[in-house]
Image: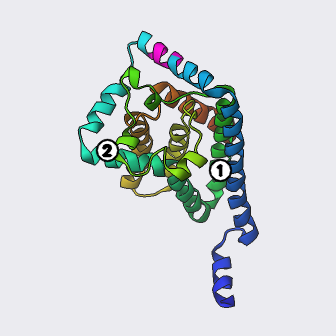
Amino acid sequence: MTATLAAASRRLPRGWAHLGLQFGLWIGFYFAYQAARGLADRGGDATAFANGEWIIDFQRRLGAMFELTLQRAVDSSGFLIQATSITYWLSQFAVVGLALIWVYFRAHERFFAFRNTLIGGNLIGLLFYVLVPTAPPRMFPGAGFTDTLAAHSTVNHSSTFIAFAANPYAAMPSLHALDSAIVSVVMATVVRRRWAKILWLLWAPWVWFAVMATGNHFWLDIAVGVLIAAAVAAVVYRPWRYRSRMS
């Protein structure tokens, strides 16, 4: 056992304590998420539904309620129902976690900026959840939306654990969109094979499609999530710093 631990330690870029710290940060984020959920719940259902109705009215004025078309397309295909449902549940925590672990071990010099961009974006998202709780499309059947997960998946927002752990009014911004945008760009820059780069670049658009087609986000939620990701990435990576060095 000692020899095994010693061999494993040699593979760690900065030791067990540093790896443990990274897990601690994500556990801390989970508790911050739960705190934000509690504060959002205090605002009551009325505020969340009013904000959701505002988004519906805004998108209708733009003539851009295309989420309904996406939902009808998915609901007509058993394969798409399963694919989008699995994507919705796994994209935010499982894929993000695996991407972080991969970068930590395989491209460690990129890890800290990657981690900090994710944390910064998600913290801003949590602030939105407290200040602007918003009901997701699936809670507006009168507008034509359906809850794809509730209708077709054994795991949905009414499941015991999901109902306990998830924030029901966390539509604006879409952390699925925010996280997938960051993961797509970072992973596309660290993997070497061209086909892998292409797949990672396609990951974010697929997640955006999945969360809209399952009735969990408006396109406006996604747009705001991507804008937050871009803004935080600009601060963390400071691309102008490299341009100034080259000039």
Does the CB distance between marks 1 and 2 fall below 8 Å?
no
Q: How many marks?
A: 2
Q: Locate residue 28 relative to residue 138 in the image: left or right.
A: right
Q: Residue at x 28, y 31 (%)?
A: 72
Quadrant housing residue 243: top right
Q: CA–CA distance between discs 1 and 2?
A: 31 Å
Horizontal and vertical percent position of residue 63: 38, 13
The crowding category of the residue bearing disc 2, from other C-alpha atoms within 10 Å (few below 14, some 14 to 19, many at least 20), is many
Q: Locate residue 47 relative to residue 149 in the image: left or right.
A: right
Q: Which residue is tagged 2?
A: 81
Q: Is residue 77 visible?
A: yes
Tag shown at residue 204: none
In-front residue for pair 75/91: 75
Horizontal and vertical percent position of residue 8: 63, 79
Q: Is residue 64 magenta?
A: no
Horizontal and vertical percent position of residue 242: 65, 39
Q: Residue at x 64, y 55 (%)?
A: 111
Q: Is residue 239 visible?
A: no
Residue type at tag 1: Arg
Quadrant the C terminus occupies? top right
Image height of 39 relative to 66, above or below: below
Horizontal and vertical percent position of residue 84: 37, 44
Label 2 secondary element: helix
Residue type at tag 2: Ile
Q: Which residue is tagged 1?
A: 115
Image: magenta residue range: 54-59
